[in-house]
Image: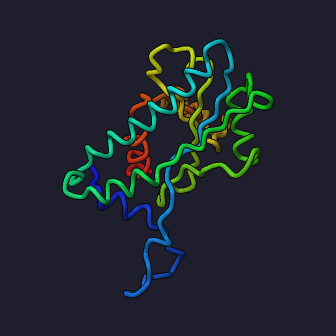
Amino acid sequence: METITRFLDHLYQLPKGRTVGPEEDQEQFLVQWGYTIYRTYYGPGSDEQWSKLLKDITDGVAEALTELEEAVKEPDTLTKIRDQFRLDARSDPATLDGSTLEDVRQVYLEGSGGQPMRGIQPCNFGIVIFLLADAEVLQDPDLRLLKVADARYDPVAAVPRNTRSGPQRNFGWLTIPTTAVLDFYNWMDIFT
């Protein structure tokens, strides 16, 4: 499990080769963290589900932050990290209603509707992630799962060249519990 101070250290992004002098304010290098989330379903009751989903994610992140090591000892650090969390919520029925995952990948990569949050950690080798709330997610009355997608997924490259190693395992997206966004963020940081 990551400590709260180590997590905060990840949020300071200095330009390459730059150091902070003793009299310089480090806070100017503090960046926001989080993900862009797209809504592609606009059926009956989906407005309420969308609002509830965004609240569940934000509440889940706030609660998970309190479970990081040393969070109780560092309330100011906890508050600073929580205040830097953002969900860049994109909900535009005119362009997103009924869009497929591939359509949303293109919207994300093109930056349609404004530059999306990159959803990246400092050492993740260029993996770019966004969240997706489609019909399957928003029609679940309990909003238990959320889709996470790799914006740069290449379906051709994902097909194994050697079938002896098994079938294709990566399809460019996976599901996570709506309360596990912080865990996923940490997981991405550790394993990429």
The residue that appears at 65% across and 12% down in the rendered structure is 44
15 sits to left or right of 180 = right
Along the line of sight, which residue is nearer the eye, 169 or 140? 140
From what the image shows, is residue 83 above or below residue 164? below
22 sits to left or right of 57 = left
- Where does residue 61 sit, x and y in percent of width and height? 39, 41
64 sits to left or right of 95 = left
- Where does residue 99 sit, x and y in percent of width and height? 73, 26
- Where does residue 141 sit, x and y in percent of width and height? 49, 13
Along the line of sight, which residue is nearer the eye, 8 or 127? 8
Count the marks: 0
The residue that appears at 48% across and 60% down in the rendered structure is 122
- Where does residue 74 sit, x and y in percent of width and height? 24, 58
The residue that appears at 59% across and 52% down in the rendered structure is 118
**One can see residue 161 in this view:** no
From what the image shows, is residue 13 above or below residue 21? above
Residue 138 quadrant: top right
Residue 80 quadrant: bottom left
Q: How is the image coloured?
A: rainbow
**One can see residue 63 in this view:** yes
Residue 152 quadrant: top right
From what the image shows, is residue 17 above or below residue 86? below
